[in-house]
Amino acid sequence: MIRPLLVGATGLVLVGAAWALLVAPEEAIQGVPQRIMYVHVPSVITAYVALGVVFVGSVLFLWRRDARWDHLAHAAAELAVLFISMTLISGAIWGKPVWGTWWTWDARLTTTLILWFIYVGYLIVRAWAPGSRGARTAAVIGIVGVLDVPLIHWSAILLRTLHPQPTVLRPEGPALPASMLVPLVVNLAAYLLMFAALLAIRVRQERTLTALVDALEGA
Amino acid sequence: MKAIWLLVSKDLRLEWRTREIVTTVGLLALLLVIVLGAVRSDPEGAPAAMWVTYAFAATLGFTRTFALERDHLTGLRLAPIDRGAIYAAKALTNWVMLAVVQAVSLPVFGALFTEALWTRVPALALPMVLGGIGLAAIGTLFGGLIVQTRLREALLPILMLPVALPLLIAATSATAAILEGQAIAAVSAQLQLLGAFDILFVTASAVLFDVVLEE
């Protein structure tokens, strides 16, 4: 089950990258840097999906006390940090030619950066506090981090804003032409599929590790 | 309520007799004021310096209040008290200690950074109290979670500061506006954010605190 998923995800990522670089039209004002959108937007959406999985996994783990939910939350948190990092890096590379700056204290950028810190903290707790206590501590961080998202966003709006408003996910419908929207959706599907594949692999690894540790302690 | 009062008075009495936390945290706060003031002591720097100081004083102090409990919180765990009450008591103790540090360091900010502070104390109390409650709410939850882990003093700031960032942004911005002489009405958005942070994290922490007291 996992291998075809991983092969399919890899194939779709390659198709998406080729489409974005070779087929999609060049944007009139920004030119080539605009193609970073095909990495940036799918990364951030996948990152937020991953955070949702962390939240659900953490809540269900604290409620049901089933280690499988903890494995799910742990694996999703690692991938959340990966995709948030990709968002921040691709955003900085896009921002330099278009805005003239690598970084600005905009609401969206600040929110993403702070989430990166919160979930790196999550991973540090997992590394330094193994066992069931570390798992419970991590679950609390996973929940608190997601609860904090609207507040971080609100506080950053108090600061200032430069990031463009949403052009795809907005109530009036997408403002992007189909020639750009289709490759964007392909890339988004590719990233989500890759997330699912990596998540399945990491959950399986965690499960095997737990079984191994239990077996060694039993022996 | 009686249980909360008993726990708070126990912790505060312990602290009154040893003065361990207020001395070390208060001294750290003064040092931070001096260091920040030596680098930049114009009035514009005051709000940021105040909240950096409070945040670091909080991260140091909040690990100590749980360290007061010997034997890995066994006493608290065995106490025939609702766990929400234990959370409320610890958070209240933490907030009282932070408020003492805030009150003690305030004159130093006034002396080093800005004279305007003296006339604005009643208005400043609002963001200071709301911000202090939020820091105590989140710091008590995380402080309790990590007190039994290795490297607890290192872990608390890296967990607490990112989560507390919206609070620090709102509090710093409100403090800056008040020091510039603006009316309370001008900072209502910031105060609303602080209030929302307090309500959200006091509630969430009280619910999640069961996890802290598990074996």
Image (spheres, rainbow, N blue to C red):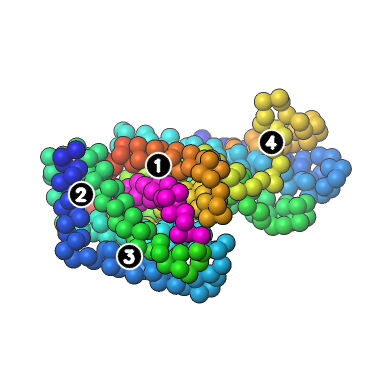
Q: Nearer the viewer, mark 2 or mark 4?
A: 2
Which callout, 4 or 1, points to the residue nearer the camera? 1
Residue B127 falls inside the magenta stretch? yes
Q: In the displayed structure, does residue A195 sit left or right of residue B120?
A: right
Image quarter of residue A9: top right
The amino acid type found where label 4 is placed reads Pro
SS under mark 4: loop
Disc 1 to disc 2, C-alpha distance: 20 Å
- Verify CB contact (< 8 Å) between mark 4 and mark 1: no
Q: Amino acid at mark 3?
A: Val
In the rendered structure, which disc, 1 or 3, sits on the residue that comes first in sequence?
3
SS under mark 1:
helix
Q: Which residue is mark 3?
A: B25
Q: Residue at x 56, y 43 (%)?
A: B186
x then y, percent, for residue B197: 44, 41
| Residues drawn in magenta | B116-144
The image quadrant of residue A174 is top right
Task: Say which residue label 2 marks.
Answer: B8
Q: Is residue A7 above or below residue B52?
A: above
> Which residue shows up at 81% across the image and 39% down it?
A24
Decide: is A133 above or below B106.
above
Residue nearest the observer in this picture, A71 or A116? A116
Q: Is label 4 or label 3 in front?
A: 3
Is there a contact, CB below 8 Å, between mark 2 and mark 4? no
Mark 2: which secondary structure? helix
Alpha carbon of mark 4 to alpha carbon of mark 3: how far?
Answer: 45 Å
**Can residue B215 be seen?**
yes
- Say the numbered circle drawn on residue B198: 1
Callouts 4 and 3 close, C-beta under 8 Å = no
First reached walking from the N terminus: tag 2 or tag 3: 2
User: In what element is the residue under mark 3?
Assistant: helix
